């Protein structure tokens, strides 16, 4: 099993920045794919960014490309999502997720492990 604990959400004005963290513990040795998702009220959970260890590839949703950056601290087993130039439409609960799959995916159903979510609210 893998446990994920997120932190870093909060309230920020439009144009501001936040950095989300996702600390992983447990059986992480065969985790190949990491993803960040978000879910706004009344909407489906959507892909934000992802990293795949197998190919070393990083992918972003078009809506966040150029503003968000995914990174990691291997020594701390922690993933980060740096969010800059935030917009009110970025307001959502943000989740990190991990999977054993060796290829990237933008679909929530492909991820086995999920964090508890952290609220990000961007005021206009």
Image: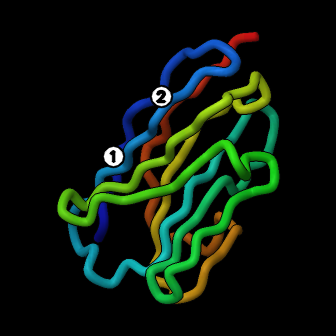
- The residue closer to the viewer here, 43 or 92, is 92
Residue found 20% across the figure and 57% down from its top: 76
Disc 1, SS: strand
Q: Which residue sits furthest front?
A: 66
Q: With respect to residue 67, does 69 lie above or below?
A: below
Residue 89 location, x and y as percent?
79, 29
Q: With respect to residue 73, does 18 lie above or below?
A: above
- The residue closer to the viewer here, 1 or 23, is 23
Horizontally, is 105 left or right of 21 in the view? right
Residue 100 location, x and y as percent?
44, 82
Q: Are marks 1 and 2 in contact (CB under 8 Å)?
A: no
Mark 1 residue crowding within 10 angstroms, few (<14) / some (14–19) / many (20+):
some
Number of callouts: 2
- Which image quadrant is residue 77 in? bottom left
- Quadrant assignment for the C terminus: top right
- The residue closer to the viewer here, 65 or 104, is 65
Mark 2 residue crowding within 10 angstroms, few (<14) / some (14–19) / many (20+):
some
Q: Which residue is mark 1?
A: 5
What's the image's color scheme? rainbow
Q: Which residue is mark 2?
A: 9
Horizontally, is 15 left or right of 5 in the view? right
Residue found 70% across the figure and 12% down from its top: 123
- Which image quadrant is residue 40 in? top right
Question: Where residue 61 is drawn, which disc sits there?
Answer: none
Disc 2, SS: loop
Residue 10 location, x and y as percent?
49, 20
Residue found 50% across the figure and 81% down from its top: 56
- Quadrant assignment for the N terminus: bottom left
- The residue closer to the viewer here, 10 or 19, is 19
């Amino acid at each position: 099993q893998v446990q994920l604990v997120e932190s870093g959400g909060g309230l920020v004005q439009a144009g501001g920045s936040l950095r989300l963290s996702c600390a992983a513990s447990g059986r992480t040795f065969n985790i190949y794919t990491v993803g960040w998702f978000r879910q706004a009220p009344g909407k489906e959970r959507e892909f934000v960014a992802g990293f795949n260890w197998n190919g070393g590839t990083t992918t972003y949703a078009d809506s966040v490309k150029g503003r968000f950056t995914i990174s990691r601290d291997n020594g701390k087993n922690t993933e980060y999502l740096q969010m800059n130039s935030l917009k009110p439409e970025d307001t959502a609960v943000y989740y990190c997720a991990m999977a054993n799959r060796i290829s990237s995916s933008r679909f929530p159903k492909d991820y086995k492990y999920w964090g508890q979510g952290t609220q990000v609210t961007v005021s206009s």
